[in-house]
Image: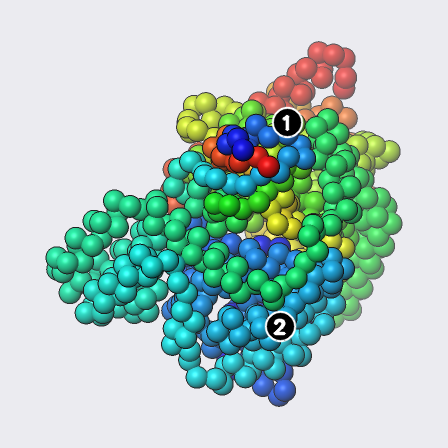
């Protein structure tokens, strides 16, 4: 089980959020949108620009900067 | 007195749809006091009772993250609605219930509208409504399909029951973990000696969550400020701020999980094949941007073909007929000449020219509304993020720019969804370059005069130029006036949905009626004033260069000589455009020989301009100083006259420079 930044995942990869270190406001916002510890995500798109992930039945685009700061354990 | 119901919910939960379905046409839009966030209110009747419905801004949470959130939560706590209807997207129930949890923490009376159950069904989700309700502490959960008006009666029955029910006093207790629960109890106890207008437990929770505004409320209290014990406690809290706040969020999600486990069943993986298929194309690495450009081109082309070619003529004939009818009537009544001149030249010549463009504006808003309601706009922001990032902004800023296409006033207001000051300031300052709906008629007149067969293309070029200049200025601003880190991009991409006709039409009507109101007030006043300026001093030829208006034009027109339209009429047109962009065509209509119908104006324009000077004039109109309404909105939003004046001034310089550039380069290349 590796922990790596979300931005390092490939399309189709799945994982669980382990921690976010993006500074107060952004971290809380992500938490409130459901990216809290243990949340299951799947990378839909990671080529250029923001990364698209699914979180539950939700589709969310995250800027690359943020995706570097979200650590995920790949499954 | 009528009972008041507040509507809250996540973005994209169907809140607007429900609001429209309940209130129908009986609604009005205003502002929340002190801020420019839109406040929608409406009335409706149910079982012979009248109810007020207040639409609160769509939010994910009720913290202090944005102005929207603060407005929503302050209204719930202090506006004293009799009940809150919480719109919950059934397909997304876990995240949506996070907000519900916060409503329960506030001790508000809540009814949950479990919306989009049709989609949930097609995803084979199942709900045990009774159990859900029980676990939410007795909150009624009513399934609805707002877009097809299903379940509304049941929802209202439940709402009425809840209004008449006694207040629940913290009946639902949520545990945030043993340690936090103790802290919460201690703090609540400490706060109980103060005289606060907020529920104590809620305030305590908010303070633990690191909410500055909650802390301020407490410290404003005379008694509490003096409490040493409280002071020490707050210091302790501040030291563990980030852990505490995340623990509380976790606690809420744990509660949501307890509520949904066993009561919400979904097949292992949510299937959204349709949305995924479309997204694969429209968010494609290379295709995304060209597709966005094509969609916008299509919007303008359709606006043009249907609004102008098909319906424009019909409207123009109608206006002419009306004008003749009224003039005939006035003549029969023996009205004085000046009144006849005012009505037929001032009113119908000026205002009529504006009215003729209604079909166009209707079309533009309908199409934009379709894009918005279908869910595409979020993709546009996504696709634009790369480009915007290169300019030091983030993709969401582009949405305020698109809103600006309709009108710069809501465009500037839309910047408040941006969290960083840098993004907001830049997005505000560049918004005037987004060509608003009121400028459309100006281009159309010039297109009809010089480029009749390339209407859609010319429009597309004009709008694109506006975007490019806006982006260029954004880059310049982000490297000079507003340095700093580019903010993060977080954007939900809602599933594509068939747009609800009622929403699209409602949205169009809000905008068009705004336009009509302006036409009836501001533009009417401007047109009347200009008419007075055009006929004074007495004895001169009306609308001639000797009139006051003419002299103003003659005085400022040399400034525009290098841009190729140094005639006084054009100068007068631009001058009136600062009052309202709608007045430009109206004024041009007046100064070019008391025009009563479109064709004459077009002919007059053809005589006064060349294709090249028409192009430079269009560029000037596109870019120069925005209308007074926009300038005053910029003042309100930035809270500074300095920025408002700056916005007015720099846009003029940019417009003038570009117009001159177009004309001079064009001349050099041999165009005329
Ligand atoms: N299938 C379905 N679509 C809905 C329902 N309610 C709203 N919609 C659609 O969902 C989208 C978002 O709705 P809207 O009211 O704009 O959401 P808001 O952001 O919460 O105001 C629109 O395209 C609506 O037409 C519903 O109950 N079922």
- Structural distance between the alpha carbons of marks 2 and 1: 42 Å
- Residue B47 image-quadrant placement: bottom right
Report x, y in % for residue B535.
61, 48
Residue drawn at (57%, 62%), measured in percent from left and top?
A: B261
The residue indicated by pointer 2 is: B129
Report x, y in % for residue B151.
69, 74
The answer to whether residue B143 shows anywhere in this view is yes
The residue indicated by pointer 1 is: A48
Chain where mark 2 sits: B
Residue B548 shown left or right of residue B339 in the figure = left
Residue B143 shown left or right of residue B211 in the figure = right
Q: In which quadrant will I find the C terminus of chain B?
A: top right
Report x, y in % for residue A3.
50, 32
Is B169 placed above or below B301 here? below
Q: Nearer the viewer, residue B411 or B208?
A: B208
For the image, the number of numbered tags is 2
Residue B161 shown left or right of residue B192 in the figure = right
The crowd level at tag 2 (other Cα within 10 Å; few <14, some 14-19, many 20+) is some
Report x, y in % for residue B57.
52, 58
The crowd level at tag 1 (other Cα within 10 Å; few <14, some 14-19, many 20+) is few
């Amino acid at each position: 089980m590796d922990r790596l930044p979300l931005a390092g995942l490939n399309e189709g990869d799945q994982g669980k959020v382990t921690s976010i270190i993006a500074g107060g406001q952004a971290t809380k916002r992500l938490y409130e949108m459901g990216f809290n510890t243990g949340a299951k995500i799947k990378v839909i798109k990671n080529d250029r620009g923001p990364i698209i992930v699914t979180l539950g039945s939700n589709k969310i685009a995250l800027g690359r900067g943020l995706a570097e700061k979200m650590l995920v354990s790949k499954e | 007195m009528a009972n008041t119901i507040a509507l809250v919910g996540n973005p994209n939960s169907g809140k607007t749809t429900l609001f429209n379905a309940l209130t129908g046409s009986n609604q009005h839009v205003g502002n929340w006091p002190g801020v420019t966030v839109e406040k929608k209110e409406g009335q409706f009747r149910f079982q012979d009772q009248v109810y007020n419905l207040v639409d609160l801004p769509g939010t994910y949470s009720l913290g202090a993250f944005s102005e929207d959130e603060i407005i929503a939560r302050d209204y719930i706590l202090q506006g004293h609605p009799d009940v809150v209807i919480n719109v919950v997207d059934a397909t997304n129930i876990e995240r949506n219930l996070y907000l519900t949890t916060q409503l329960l923490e506030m001790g508000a009376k809540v009814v949950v509208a479990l919306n989009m159950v049709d989609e949930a069904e097609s995803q084979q989700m199942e709900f045990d409504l009774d159990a859900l309700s029980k676990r939410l502490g007795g909150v009624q959960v009513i399934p609805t399909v707002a877009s097809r008006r299903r379940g509304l009666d049941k929802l209202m029955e439940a709402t009425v029951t809840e209004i008449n029910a006694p207040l629940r006093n913290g009946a639902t207790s949520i545990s945030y973990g043993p340690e936090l629960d103790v802290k919460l109890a201690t703090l609540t106890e400490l706060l109980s000696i103060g005289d606060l207008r907020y529920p104590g437990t809620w305030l305590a929770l908010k303070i633990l969550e690191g909410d500055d505004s909650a802390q301020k409320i407490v410290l404003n209290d005379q008694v509490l400020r003096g409490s040493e014990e409280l002071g020490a406690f707050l210091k302790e809290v501040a030291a563990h701020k980030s852990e505490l706040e995340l623990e509380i969020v976790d606690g809420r999600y744990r509660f949501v999980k307890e509520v949904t486990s066993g009561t919400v069943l979904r097949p292992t993986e949510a299937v959204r094949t349709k949305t995924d298929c479309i997204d694969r194309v429209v968010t494609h690495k290379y295709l995304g941007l060209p597709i966005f450009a094509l969609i916008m081109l299509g919007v303008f082309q359709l606006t043009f073909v249907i609004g102008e070619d098909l319906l424009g003529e019909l409207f123009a004939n109608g206006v002419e007929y009306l004008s003749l009818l009224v003039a005939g009537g006035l003549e029969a009544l023996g009205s004085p000449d000046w009144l006849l001149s005012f009505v037929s030249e001032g009113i119908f010549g000026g205002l009529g020219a504006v009215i003729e463009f209604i079909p166009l504006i209707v079309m533009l808003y309908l199409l934009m509304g379709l894009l918005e309601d279908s869910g595409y706009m979020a993709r546009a922001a996504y696709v634009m993020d790369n480009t915007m990032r290169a300019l030091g902004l983030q993709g969401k800023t582009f949405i305020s720019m698109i809103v600006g296409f309709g009108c710069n006033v809501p465009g500037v207001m839309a910047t408040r969804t941006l969290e960083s000051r840098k993004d907001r300031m830049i997005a505000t300052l560049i918004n005037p370059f987004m060509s608003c709906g009121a400028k459309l008629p100006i281009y159309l007149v010039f297109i009809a005069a010089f480029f009749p067969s390339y209407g859609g293309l010319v429009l597309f070029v004009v709008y694109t130029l506006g975007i490019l200049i806006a982006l260029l200025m954004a880059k310049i601003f982000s490297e000079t006036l507003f340095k700093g880190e580019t903010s993060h991009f977080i954007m939900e991409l809602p599933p594509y949905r068939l747009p609800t006709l009622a929403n699209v039409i409602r949205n169009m009507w809000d905008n068009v009626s705004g336009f009509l109101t302006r036409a009836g007030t501001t533009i009417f006043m401007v047109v009347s004033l200009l008419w007075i300026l055009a006929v004074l001093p007495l004895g001169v030829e009306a609308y001639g260069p000797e009139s006051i208006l003419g002299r103003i034009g003659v005085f400022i027109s040399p400034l525009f000589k290098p841009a190729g339209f140094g005639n006084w009429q054009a100068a007068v047109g631009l001058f009136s455009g600062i009052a309202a962009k709608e007045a430009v065509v109206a004024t041009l209509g007046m100064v070019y020989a008391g025009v009563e119908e479109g064709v004459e104006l077009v002919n007059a324009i053809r005589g006064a301009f060349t294709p090249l000077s028409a192009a430079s004039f269009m560029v000037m109109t596109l870019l120069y100083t925005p209308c007074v309404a926009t300038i005053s909105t910029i003042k309100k939003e930035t809270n500074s006259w300095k920025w408002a004046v700056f916005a007015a001034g720099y846009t003029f310089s940019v417009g003038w420079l570009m117009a001159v550039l177009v004309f001079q380069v064009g001349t050099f290349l041999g165009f005329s």
